[in-house]
Amino acid sequence: MADGTKAVVDTSAADAAADEAALAAAIDELAGSADAREGASADARKGAAAAAAVDTDADTDADTTADDEADEAKGGESPVSEETSEITAPLSVQEIRAELAAGSPRKKPAPSPAAARPARRPTDPQPTVDPRDTATLPRTLPAPQRRSGDMIGHRYRLEECISQTATFSSWRAVDEKLRRAVGVHLMASGHQRARKVLAAAKSAALLGDPRFVQVLDAVHEGELVYVVREWLPHSSDLARLIANGPMEPHEAYQMVRQVADAVAAAHRRGQAHLRLTPRCVLRTDSGQYRINGIAVDAALRGLPGEEAEDAERADTRAIGALLFAALTHRWPYPEDRYDLQGLPRGLQNVSPDQVRAGVHKGLSELAARALFDQPPHHAQPITTPEELVRAIAKLPRIRQPEPELPAFPAPPRHNTHALPTAPNPTRVADTTVNPLPASSRPTSSRRTRRRLRQVVKATAWTVALGAIGVASWQFVDNLRHTGTTVTSTTPSATSAAPSPQASTHNPVPLTVKSVTSYTGPGEGNEGSDSPAKVIDNDPSTAWTTQWYADQFGPKAPALKAGTGLLLDLGSPQAVSSVSVQFVGEHTAELRVPGAGAAANPANAKLDGFTVVGKKSGPNVEYTLESPVTTRYLLLWLTALPKDGNGHFTGQVAEVKVSG
């Protein structure tokens, strides 16, 4: 095909050809021609062999074999699928004679027990032989060898290898087109898991839940299959968070609540994770938990896809293991995993509060019910993420611990000016200690009062001199701007400060003809709302930008330098001020196009505009020292506030232009 993938050929045509050839042989045999019977049987065998040589999809065989191995790993025989149960070998001459002699219709022979494949160990599969006998289809290929600096898909530049296994490698890369950091998984396209990896990545991309790390791209290109995902540079996985000790109850509660909500929402849409580990749960700098590798991690490692009920139980048990590890700083299985020590092999079905003292009772019971099929104390097990969400909602509220106040040293006893402290009811006055006589008391209090008076005098003089200097500067500045000479033969204290001058310019509102989003040449439109909402005289409506995982900035890890709105006045106008009403704290620049960008500002580069003002706040007003004659104005946003999901999102409610 044009995209390099192999065409899938239906094997039912081969089966029909074989059956027709066998039927022709039977008819000839009934006619009494022994030679014809033998010739027809030979033709039947040749036709069946030719039909079997038709090119079938190697990926389909790979998927069937991988599923068979997964079933064998569970300890049972591989079930025969509906497709393979209809495929049989052509009958021989002896079998046709036996059927004709018995006078019974031809039936497909049942598979003999001796023909069943021997059980294999649940390890990474070995190379298998293609039935066409023309080549071998590797079921295990080594991870593609790449180096830092290599380009993938003419777009993604590899920077650092995060992890590497025998079959795939994971990298931190840079999207050269959008100038952002991404994560990339690489696998050989000839691997039997490649097709499942692509299918899992595409289904995860369609999930569209911001609580999961987004899959951005999944491509089969030549001998390489790669999956591109979102990269969270300012996040820490759960394994790192609990590496030095268990979590506080409030933090563990927030983790399990957010993870359970996200996984339950995914299962409602038919998605499962199947490999939820402490490395897959990430906490951002805003305290939000996000889940990485839904469906993709399991496909990369060849884990079999389970039925819906088994998948729900597997993900629920994994969440219980995460909560167990967060509460106890121990892995709930005998093996040491994720830098955590495992439990002794003799301990089975124990709750976290039996492993470590001081564990929250409600969270301990919740972890045991989700993790074990037979929880301790005859508790009812939790088998689905939806049940786990309801159980978490029934927990009593777990409050966040109060921050510890810094310890201040007690004031010395001779400091009589110390602030009074609250009486201590447990303190008993010592009657054996007599107060010092007045003549023997220290005189440090008098020195302290004298020093305080000197400080107050110095401060007062400093403030007075500063006020006089500011008033004089304002007076001189006013004379410089107005050009008038003020004389006074009897100066007074009130004549030092000039009276405010009335402005000679009356601002006139200007009409904005149209508003479009501006992101630079070739970047496309910004936001899903209409930019015209900023000039509809309705502050309740606003133009909203896209959400970004990182703040704007000129350097990595910022996704881009900014975004903005291009205002068209219809014709060149003298602009003296622009007022903007945002939703939240923003930082924005007001720019006007230069000589090179005035003809087509929508396609001009950002450096073709001149900055005439920069301000921050929810409501800003750009007042120009002298009116600027221009037709276009660019409101360029350089910093956005965070929304409720921890993303950076900008909203502009109203823009007013005055001349």
Image (cartoon, rainbow, N blue to C red):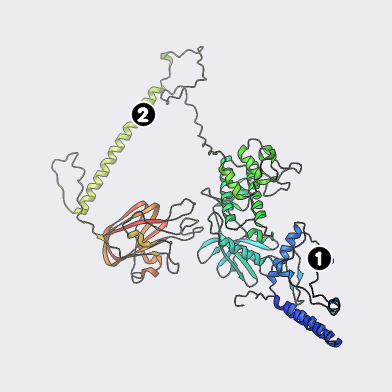
Q: For the residue carrying disc 1, how many other residues have a C-alpha within 10 Å: few (<14), some (14-19), or many (20+)? A: few
Q: Give, as a three-letter code, the residue at label 1.
A: Ala
Give coordinates of residue 56: x percent, y percent: 70, 75
Residues at marks 1 and 2, CA–CA distance in whole angstroms: 99 Å
Label ID, residue 452: 2
The answer to whether residue 564 shows anywhere in this view is: yes
Between residue 347 and residue 396, name the one nearer to us: 396
Q: Image quadrant for the C terminus?
A: bottom left
Q: Which mark is residue 116?
A: 1
Spot the residue most to the left.
Answer: 489
Which mark sits nearer the N-terminus, 1 or 2? 1
Foreground residue, 514 or 349? 349
* Depicted 336 relative to depicted 194: above or below: above
Q: Position of residue 510 (x, y in %)?
A: 26, 61
Q: How many marks?
A: 2
The answer to whether 243 is drawn above or below residue 223 in the figure is above
Q: Quadrant of residue 248?
A: top right
Nearer mark to the viewer, of 1 and 2: 1
Q: Residues within 10 Å of mark 2 (few under 14, many from 20)?
A: few
Name the element at disc 1.
loop
Dividing the picture into quadrants, the one containing residue 174 is bottom right
Residue type, numbered disc 2: Leu
Residue 360 seen in the figure: no
